[in-house]
Image: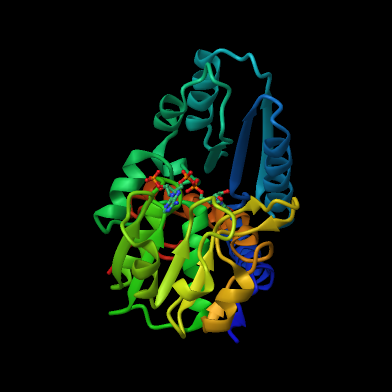
Amino acid sequence: MGNILDGKAIAEKVRAEVRADVTSFVAEHGRAPGLTVVLVGEDPASVVYTRNKEKSAKECGIAGTLLRLPADTPEAEVLALVAKLNGDDAVDGILVQLPLPRHVREAEVLRAIDPDKDVDGFHALNAGRLATGQPALVPCTPTGCMRLIAESGVELAGARAVVVGRSNIVGKPMAQLLLAKHATVTIAHSRTRDLPAVCREADVLVAAVGRAEMVRGDWVKPGAVVIDVGINRDTNGKLVGDVAFAEARERASWITPVPGGVGPMTIACLLANTVAAARARTAARRGLRERPGQRGLHGGARR
Ligand code: NDP
């Protein structure tokens, strides 16, 4: 029976590291790193997420601010706010909560964020930096998954890794991070033929699909590390992942539960990205040419 990768406990370790890093940043620079979260509208889940982000930032000593705009705010006003935050020296990280109301184009807003303040890592420049092995601000969920994989102690160099899901925010950056650690990576998706057979090859299996308990126990190679990103409700309304946990645990060496696995890591990694962005911006001003991510959890995709 596989061991549980306890995301709550590991996220607490990451937060402790962030608190220590914030303390030394304040001592060095006389100010706290700043994170501004922008919420447009009243989506109930987004209201909870953004409040948590602001609160968690403050708990770590980061100057967290939540700016709320009404749902009918014109796109031009959202872009104007982003431009103002880009120019505000006290703001190191900008996060615009998704989804945005329909009349506001997500791509336009993400493109407007200063890539060096893009703590969600969704800007195309950061995706490109990651893909080309340059230090980057990397999306928080895959960053958290990498930390969980590291805690399992599995050797990634030369290992077979399978990522199920190819979204820009989870699947693709996850695959890039595994590749940067020298895994042999397969990205599977809805058109993949014989998905169970593909998954059975994986020493490290990451499921980021959004389908309740799709990955069955017999898809898991004995001894594999299984990371379950999915957050779904089953037919009884219970919170479950993309992996049939009890079955998969029989074969895995390590496995993340849902809830309490990947979920808690995401905000912890957002806080780490904020401090990394603050340090990189400060260093860049000093002419050291340091880029965001160099002091982050992974140091970008450096080889
Ligand atoms: P998307 O819907 O953007 O992507 C889902 C991916 O899964 C797509 O690439 C899709 O393939 C693939 N897929 C869908 N059905 C199948 C199938 N039957 N077989 C194989 N692949 C399939 O989702 P996200 O990446 O945004 O999120 C994935 C999951 O992770 C969701 O449950 C989400 O709630 C959760 N999540 C959790 C976070 C956390 O903090 N724990 C953070 C972010 C997401 P195709 O491209 O071919 O359509």
Which of 281/292 is in front?
Answer: 292
- Res. 232 in view: yes
Q: Position of residue 178 (x, y in %)?
A: 35, 67
Which of 142/119 is in front?
Answer: 142
Which residue is at a point 64% across and 30% down the rendered structure image? 39
Which of 48/95 is in front?
Answer: 48
Quarter of the image where one finds residue 94: top right
Relative height, residue 6 to residue 136 (above, below)? below
Which residue is at a point 24% across and 54% down the rendered structure image? 132
Q: Position of residue 44 (x, y in %)?
A: 73, 34
Quarter of the image where one finds residue 224: bottom left
Q: Position of residue 159 (x, y in %)?
A: 32, 78
Q: Is residue 148 left or right of residue 267?
A: left
Q: Which quadrant would the N terminus be assigned to in this image?
A: bottom right
Relative height, residue 101 to residue 246 (above, below)? above
- Res. 302 in view: no
| View extreme (left): residue | 132
